[in-house]
Amino acid sequence: MDKWDVIVVGARCAGAATAAFLARAGVRTLCLERSKLSSDHVLSTHYVQPPGMDVLDELGVGTRVRELSPPSRRPMAVMEMEHIYSNYADGRAAHCIRRFVLDPLIQEAAAQSGATLREQAKVVELVKEGERVAGVVVETPSGRETLRADLVIGADGKDSTVAKLTGVERYEVFTLDRAGYWAYFPAPDIWWDREHYDCDGIIAFEGDNLRYVFQCDDNLLLLAAVPPAAEARSWGKDHRERLQHALEACELTAPLARGAQPVGDVIGLLKYESFFRRPIGPGFALVGDAGLTLDFVTGQGIAQGLLNAKALAEAVVAGRDEAYERYWRQRDADVMPLFLDAKRIGSVGFNNAFTQLLFRGASKVGDLDSFCAIMDRRHSPFELAPQSSLFRWVLGDVLRLRFGAVKPFLEMGKTLGEHQKLCDEYSARAAESAEGWDQLPAWPMDAMGSLRPRPA
Ligand SMILES: Cc1cc2nc3c(=O)[nH]c(=O)nc-3n(C[C@H](O)[C@H](O)[C@H](O)COP(=O)(O)OP(=O)(O)OC[C@H]3O[C@@H](n4cnc5c(N)ncnc54)[C@H](O)[C@@H]3O)c2cc1C
């Protein structure tokens, strides 16, 4: 085919999902991937939150994901050994499935929906007609090739080539002050003993350190240590031993790692930025990490990429400028609270006298299901615990002549106020872009702007 309706660059969770949704709508879609398909995607701890599972269900792969990986319904957050348990709502669960298992399922869904997938096709240049992107130049094992399309979608990850070649701007850029390593360990029997571990996932704050336990497919546990970035960088060639040491030094992870050998490589990430990019422009759009890279600490990237894929496909099918504008603005408004929440939780200073007090207070009250509800996007991250409780706990401390929590409490209040203001600004822009949308006539499939659907 010499010209496609849409070329999607990148065939992982965002790209393959976008291609699947577009192909189902009759859009002639080519999805290009620079690596060999089914290859592993190393830089992800791949905890898929329930809203991501919803999209996987729509793609027809949710059932298979549930068969292959155990559900996480009751994660535990720990700070200095104060435990907070949380439960997802009935029928909701997260799944942690390795990317070389998950991604092929989505790629298969794209192919079955009618999209054409090509591996080992690396986009190196964009074809332009004036200002408008009109196609791509790919490098393949048999040489260079030019492919044309009405729309090019960059689903090519945080270092997106499409974004770089279009020069699209980034905003709300934030450098994470943590970095870390992780590895897969065979799950020992003690992990499944709910008298010992009354949870099915762990995020643990201890001093400046952060550790994770996720149960994955194939009866493996993903164990991660995420210290301050400078410390992780100092591990260098000894990172395997240092990871083992960090896991054995924590009371929660020690029984899971002691005397065990990781299965496969120890994987690390030493520098990370989270940011938004303007995801639309003449002849192109961005989806997934290419358009919005979230701090990995709260594990929202995959769900976001999948939700984004669906929203972008709807905008493409609507096929007019207002739809793309709405895709952009609504994405920012929806994600900004989570983006800022991850920024707060992920920063090294999050473990302080006030958050310790919060953990202590909350752990006495019972399960804190608002934590899971936030991850499930059903509850505002600004309301983890009722404000009245926070005041009471801080006041109780002050009355006992303990003042350490007061300063971080006031600082957190100030930060939350600023973050709320920012969220309101983004929501106002989204509302503006949606104005009059309801009054526009329904856009028939055979009149999709410059996109021509394949006849049924
Ligand atoms: C350390 C770490 C831990 C994480 N943990 C979690 C977690 O627990 N839960 C979660 O939800 N998210 C997590 N994330 C985030 C998650 O991995 C990403 O949000 C997700 O992978 C984004 O998917 P994507 O499809 O947009 O991009 P990617 O998965 O990055 O895929 C992009 C694809 O594009 C291809 N590509 C790139 N350039 C080109 C080109 N020029 N031509 C052709 N193809 C190209 C690449 O080969 C790649 O296959 C984590 C991220 C990191 C770094």
Image: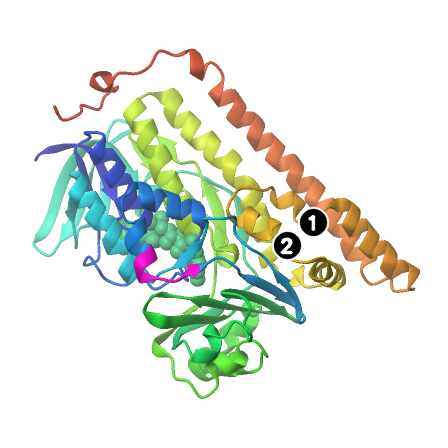
Q: Which secondary structure, mark 1?
A: loop
In-front residue for pair 249/67:
67
In-front residue for pair 441/192:
192
Name the residue that disc number 2 marks: 368
Q: Which secondary structure, mark 2?
A: loop
Q: Are marks 2 and 1 in contact (CB under 8 Å)?
A: yes
Residue sitting at x 52%, y 52%: 88
Name the residue that disc number 1 marks: 385
Q: Is residue 390 above or below residue 277?
A: below
Answer with the quarter of the image where residue 95 lies: bottom left
Q: Disc 2 or 1, which lies upstream in sequence?
A: 2
| Magenta segment includes 220 | no
Answer with the quarter of the image where residue 427 lies: top right
Residue interval drawn in magenta: 66-71
**Ligand 1 quadrant in view:** bottom left
User: What whole-number distance in Å separates the C-alpha atoms at marks 2 and 1?
Assistant: 8 Å
**Percent coordinates x, y for residue 432 in the rendering:** 52, 21
Q: Is residue 185 above or below residue 100?
A: below
Q: Is residue 251 above or below residue 303?
A: below
Residue sitting at x 20%, y 35%: 23
**Percent coordinates x, y for residue 141 in the rendering:** 11, 57
Question: Mark 1: few, some, or many residues within 10 Å (few <14, many ≥20)?
Answer: some
Residue sitting at x 41%, y 62%: 45
| Magenta segment includes 69 | yes
Residue type at mark 2? Leu
